[in-house]
Image: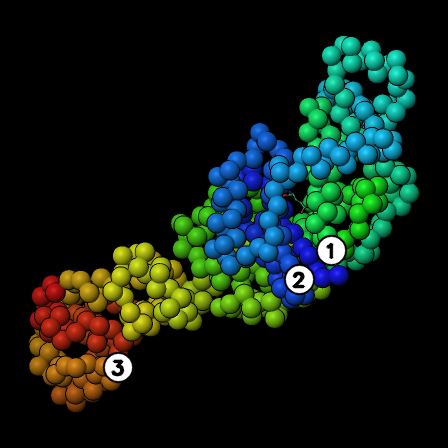
């Protein structure tokens, strides 16, 4: 059977780096195996799910290049969940419960105060028909719990190795809310079974869900997938990431931080694995290197500084074609490969190219603090056309004429030509500045 995985976000917030790492790992796993990747929106929480979050998820994945082969939306599948729930009720695996949230809290608190685990006591199973009729006549509506079998639940996790739970140590999960709406614990299993998901790769916050869900797979007659639970990313201080953490959202990394998709992918594919983090320019390279066995059980930290450093290393390698759209979006429509290759070694973010565009294509107030020397240098400027050899020829002549070398030779020229002490190699910048501007700047004029 061919490999099928899914990424199943709830559209209740922005994707953050932790969520999208799981999308990436699923995608790499599928592509490594020649399998397929399903995007499933877990949108049965109708109060919190929003179309704009669903659109944001699709935009973020598309930006990263994580295309999906199949798409599903849980809110399209209520009929199917109802049918499964009806069958589970008929077989006695789903049973009605009438406790209010307050009553459940009291039960939990009492168990905890006795030092016992807060497992649901199955009181609802002991209700008679008359009890239920009375509760319903009082206006109570049931929620429905899945009756777990009290037997061991075991699986071999691709990240955690052998995992063992005792059914008796777990609470019967609520699968249907009081208003009749099915909950994630059920819907996810029905979808994974119907859509023939072979591998469920998700965060380790779902380990206990898996124990319960394996029994639900058995009850609905679905093939049990292979599971892999990855440790969740934390921020640089070791705190968990939350969906509402704006600065680590994929949207803000893209729109505010100027992060390239392959910088984020290069980092997230390797974070928490035994591989070194290196810049990669294509997802194909990451697929070739991917192996879920390299994922470690230690908690990986996401460090925005590390991402920015990687972003810079990626930019230093990216060819012009890969950034021409971004440059045009910055208003640098006329930027060409020569400009890009001149400035990219000095960039951490593409938007910084604007500063160097201003140096090569807009008036610059030169720092012309050695006028006599600059006048001698200006007199030696070669005729155009200029190319990458012009700087060497020219400064060779200036050196021979003035006897200056090293910093004494180069820094006054840089300060006059660019108005700054540091920047891209002048060999590359000089032909972009051109003879007319260069001559004026060497004469101390803003040009
Ligand atoms: N919607 C669930 C979540 O975002 C999916 C978990 C899963 O992968 O099963 O946590």
Mark number displayed over residue 35: 2
Q: Which residue bears the numbered disc 3? A: 388
Q: Residue at x 14, y 73 (%)?
A: 438
Q: Of the residues under marks 3 and 1, which one precedes in the sequence?
A: 1
Q: Earlier in the sequence, mark 2 or mark 1?
A: 2
**Cβ–Cβ below 8 Å for labels 2 and 1?**
yes
Q: Residues within 10 Å of mark 1 (few under 14, many from 20)?
A: many
Secondary structure type for disc 3 = loop
Sequence order check: which comes first, mark 3 or mark 2? 2
Q: Which residue is mark 1?
A: 198
The x and y percentages for residue 279 are 50, 68
Secondary element type, mark 2: loop
**Residues under labels 3 and 2: Cα distance?**
48 Å
Q: Is residue 96 left or right of residue 351?
A: right
Q: Residue at x 17, y 70 (%)?
A: 416
Total labels: the figure holds 3
Q: Residues within 10 Å of mark 2 (few under 14, many from 20)?
A: some
Between the residue at mark 2 and the residue at mark 1, the CA separation in whole angstroms equals 10 Å
Q: Quadrant of residue 37?
A: bottom right
Q: Is residue 270 left or right of residue 142?
A: left
């Amino acid at each position: 059977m061919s490999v099928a995985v899914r990424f199943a976000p709830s559209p209740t917030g922005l994707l953050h780096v932790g969520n999208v790492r799981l999308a990436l790992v699923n995608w790499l796993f599928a592509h490594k195996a020649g399998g397929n990747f399903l995007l499933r929106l877990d949108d049965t929480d109708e109060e919190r799910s929003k179309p704009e979050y669903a659109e944001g998820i699709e935009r973020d994945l598309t930006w990263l290049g994580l295309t999906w082969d199949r798409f599903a939306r849980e809110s399209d599948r209520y009929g199917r969940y109802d049918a499964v729930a009806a069958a589970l009720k008929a077989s006695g695996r789903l049973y009605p419960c009438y406790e209010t949230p307050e009553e459940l809290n009291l039960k939990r608190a009492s168990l905890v105060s006795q030092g016992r685990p807060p497992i649901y006591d199955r009181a609802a199973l002991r209700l008679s028909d008359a009890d239920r009729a009375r509760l319903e006549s009082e206006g109570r509506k049931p929620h429905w719990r899945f009756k777990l079998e009290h037997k061991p639940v075991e699986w071999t996790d691709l990240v955690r190795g052998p995992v063992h739970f005792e059914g008796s140590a777990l609470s019967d999960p609520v699968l249907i809310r009081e208003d009749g709406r099915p909950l994630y614990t059920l819907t996810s299993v029905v979808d994974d079974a119907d859509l023939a998901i072979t591998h469920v790769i998700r965060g380790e916050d779902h380990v206990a869900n898996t124990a319960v869900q394996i029994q639900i797979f058995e009850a609905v007659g679905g093939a049990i997938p292979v599971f892999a639970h990855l440790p969740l990313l934390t921020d640089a201080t070791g705190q968990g990431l939350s969906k509402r953490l704006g600065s680590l959202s994929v949207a803000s990394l893209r729109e505010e931080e100027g992060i390239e998709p392959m910088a984020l992918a290069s980092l997230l594919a390797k974070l928490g694995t035994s591989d070194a983090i290196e810049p990669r320019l294509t997802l194909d390279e990451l697929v070739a290197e991917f192996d879920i066995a390299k994922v470690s059980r230690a908690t990986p930290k996401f460090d925005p500084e590390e991402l920015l450093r990687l972003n810079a290393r990626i930019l230093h390698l990216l060819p012009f074609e890969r950034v021409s759209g971004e440059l045009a979006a910055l208003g640098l429509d006329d930027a060409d490969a020569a400009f890009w290759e001149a400035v990219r070694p000095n960039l951490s973010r593409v938007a910084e190219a604007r500063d160097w565009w201003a140096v090569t294509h807009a008036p610059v107030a030169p720092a012309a603090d050695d006028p006599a020397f600059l006048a001698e240098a200006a007199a030696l400027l070669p005729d155009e056309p200029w190319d990458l050899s012009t700087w060497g020829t020219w400064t060779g002549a200036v050196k021979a004429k003035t006897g200056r070398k090293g910093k004494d030779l180069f820094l006054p020229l840089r300060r006059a030509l660019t108005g700054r002490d540091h920047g891209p190699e002048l060999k590359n910048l000089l032909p972009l500045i051109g003879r007319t501007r260069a001559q004026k700047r060497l004469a101390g004029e803003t040009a």
